[in-house]
Image (spheres, rainbow, N blue to C red):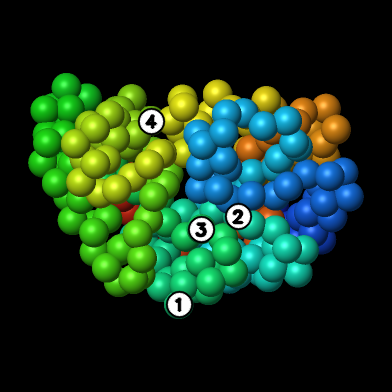
Amino acid sequence: MSRLLHRFYADYLMPSRLGIYANLLERARDAGYAQLSVRDFYREPVAAGPGTRKVLVHRHDIDSDLRTAKKMFALETRYGVKASYYFRLSTLDFGFMRDIEAAGSEASYHYEEVADYAKRNRIRCPDEIRRRLPEIREQFIRNFESIAQRLGMQMVTVASHGDFANRRLRVINHELLTDTDLRRRCGIECDSYDKDLLRHFDMYISDREHPHYYTPLSPFDALGRYDRICFLTHPLQWETNWVETTRCNLRRLAEEIAWRA
């Protein structure tokens, strides 16, 4: 029962936490951290090796709630912060994505073709979904190229989305990018879960739902203790959006029912 109450509070009653986010940007700036996108950070150590300066990399997975994502972007613009925003097919906003790129940040693809394929075809066997990976990779390429064409620029990093179907199948979307030919065809330099990227971080932090908010520790506590930090955030963890949250909850329920049918 307490879990349901926490979820209801987080979805519908929680006060905005954007002031906390603004405070984090300010604290990181004052502590001497360069605040970068995934793309800029990845290219920096690849070109010159791990640096000694303090870095806070901001990664935003736009699973839902473009309204709050735009508010976070406005705060970052105010503080001169660069960040990466990864959009699902269901959250693509090309005007917003161009604004992000024009500000020196990064807008790219939050892909989920494995989960989409499994749900669409009602596949619940991991071996079966892996047999279909060549077909699913072709769908990824079509989606990626379509987004890049409409965006009008090359995307060089991407981020794998995690769906309930991935957890049930124990097959992650990131398996698509084990194919080096796919990466070459699309011009993808790295995925946000690549080991070649993650090994450069001293601490990787993700936001969480109320009442925990962060894992494995608060980014405020990490400042000063770690030099190279990646902070993954999701807009819905920072401000309630009744309409969008209800839509997403109903969509997931419908997908689960259809997948099990």
- Which numbered disc flags the more N-terminal residue, 2 or 1? 2
- Separation (CA) of disc 4 from disc 2: 27 Å
- What residue is disc 3 on? 106
- The quarter of the picture where residue 26 lies is bottom right
Name the one closer to the observer, 252 or 3.
Answer: 252
Could you tell me the amino acid type at mark 4? Arg
Q: Badge 3: how crowded within 10 Å, few (<14), some, or many (20+)? A: many
Q: Nearer the viewer, mark 4 or mark 1?
A: 1
- Separation (CA) of disc 3 from disc 2: 6 Å
Could you tell me the amino acid type at mark 1? Gly
Point out residue 2 in the picture as x, y percentages from the top left corner. 69, 37
Q: From where the camera sits, is residue 72 visible? A: yes
Q: Secondary structure at mark 3?
A: strand
Is residue 172 shown above or below 258? Answer: above
Q: From where the camera sits, is residue 160 visible? A: no
Could you tell me the amino acid type at mark 2? Ala
Residue at point 14% right, 46% down?
Answer: 138
Point out residue 25 in the picture as x, y percentages from the top left corner. 78, 54
- Which numbered disc flags the more N-terminal residue, 1 or 3? 1
Q: Tag on residue 167?
A: 4
Point out residue 61 in the picture as x, y percentages from the top left corner. 51, 51
Point out residue 194 in the picture as x, y percentages from the top left corner. 43, 30
Residue at point 17% right, 27% down?
Answer: 130
